Amino acid sequence: MIKLSLKKSDDSYSTAAMERMADEINALIGRLNEAGSALATQNLFHRETVQIENKPRPMRDFADVDLGPDPTVGTFTVIVHNEIVLPNVIAILKENGFINIDTSDKRKLRVVKPRPTIQQEEDLENQIKRLGKNSMSKVSAIKADAMQRLTAAIKAEYIDPPVAQKARVQLDELGDEARKHIVVLSLIRRKQLIGGGMTFDGPEEESLYRRINDSTYKEATAELLKVEAPSE
């Protein structure tokens, strides 16, 4: 998904570090996806039952949540397959805090999500920032490990000093490239979940924000929006 590049040296130390850093960045995408996940909304009817002809039936057989292409928008749709369960659907929605429900189409209810409080938005933004910082720490550790191995190789005369110098420069560039990817991915997720309410931590973050729509991040952006209900 997100790839790093070797521009200064393709030595084994840089190559191994690049692969490990890329793995960490792509693992971060999954962790960011879980932050503010719409899965709870997707599964509103997953464990509910309804009495049909005096028999308990799974509610999900009669109603589905459709989050649409972007699950972070302020509305979603409930598809009702049998109007007999409409009162149950409305009751479940209200129990979960969804009180603004358009029932003009009884087969397709439009539900407005309650706006998060300022505290909820701050908590979510801080959670995403923590995930990004933790990922940066892991990338730094990968770089430090590669540098240590490189130093040991020089002492053991396994690698020539000029080659080692190129490797050091390459490792520095890899670390910086990975760090910037992490910042951009975190900004993308914050924008998805918070929108205009997000703030920047310094001029570099504000500058990197301009990259959130780059083609490099197209696949990652879609992955961050993905909502997958667990299989039975």
Image (cartoon, grey):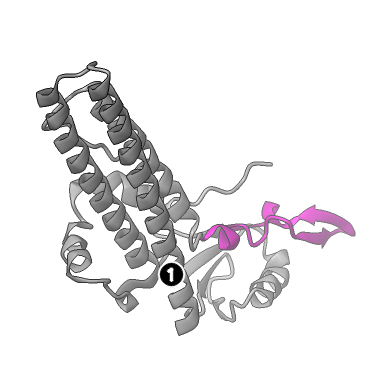
Q: Furthest-top residue in view?
A: 158
The correct choice, above or below, for 97 with respect to 88 in the image is: below
Q: Work out whether 27 lies above or below 96.
A: above
Q: Is residue 127 magenta?
A: no
Rendered location of residue 187, percent (x, y) = 30, 62
What residue is rendered at 50% in x and 77% in y?
120
Q: Residue at x 25, y 44 (%)?
A: 175
Q: How many marks?
A: 1
Between 140 and 93, the one nearer to me in the picture:
140
Nearest to the observer: residue 209 or residue 171: 171
- Crowding around mark 1 (Cα neighbors within 10 Å: few <14, some 14 to 19, many 20+) is few
Q: Is residue 98 left or right of residue 186?
A: right
Q: Is residue 1 visible?
A: no
Res. 71 image quadrant? bottom left
- Percent x, y of residue 88: 73, 70
Which residue does the numbered mark 1 point to in the structure image? Answer: 126
Which span of residues is magenta-colored?
A: 38-64
Residue nearer the viewer, 208 or 40: 208
Residue 198 image point, x, y percent:
32, 74
x, y (%) of residue 76? 49, 66
Q: Residue at x 42, y 43 (%)?
A: 27
Q: Residue at x 53, y 48 (%)?
A: 228
Where's the N terminus, which quadrant? top left
Instruction: Give above or below for 84 relative to 180.
Output: below
> Would you identify the image quadrant in which residue 12 lies?
top left
Q: Of the residues shown, which amino acid type is indicated by label 1?
A: Asn
Q: Secondary structure at mark 1?
A: helix
